[in-house]
Amino acid sequence: MHGYLVSLPLFFFDDDRVKLFVEPFERGVKVSDRGLTAMRLVMSDVKVDSDRIHKAIARSASSPRSQFEAHEGEIAAFGDEDLADLIFGVGSAAIRVDQLRWMA
């Protein structure tokens, strides 16, 4: 089994739907945007390799409820906790990161 693509009732700034990939990972699951949000920022001329933007992405992707990893442009959460919470957490983090487009 490779994983599942989940289409959420959440939308980016341009009305594209947020879609996440859910796959088995160690003893739990990994929920990620597979770098889509960072790609959208690049397409909006945001310099994602700058320190300022990298720090803003890390802050925007973090959540007190889950451990998020904004690594190489991928927003991901890992865990064996409630899958719905992980999916919503990553989806809402993607929306927050997408709002950094104003920094272009």
Image (cartoon, rainbow, N blue to C red):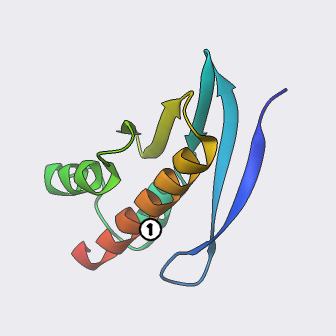
Q: Residue at x 61, y 49 (%)?
A: 84
Q: In this view, does 19 lie above or below 55?
A: below
Q: In this view, does 24 lie above or below 65?
A: above
Q: Is residue 33 visible?
A: no
Residue 56 point in image, percent of width and height = 21, 57
Q: Can residue 75 be seen in this view?
A: yes
| Residue closest to the eye, 10 or 14 | 10
Q: Is mark 1 on a helix, strand or loop?
A: helix
**Amino acid at pointer 1:** Ile
Q: Residue at x 26, y 74 (%)?
A: 104
Looking at the figure, which quarter contains the N terminus?
Answer: top right
Q: Which residue is drawn at 75% across and 50% down?
A: 5
State the residue position of label 1: 95
Residue 27 point in image, percent of width and height = 62, 16
Residue 86 point in image, percent of width and height = 53, 45
Q: Quadrant of residue 52?
A: bottom left
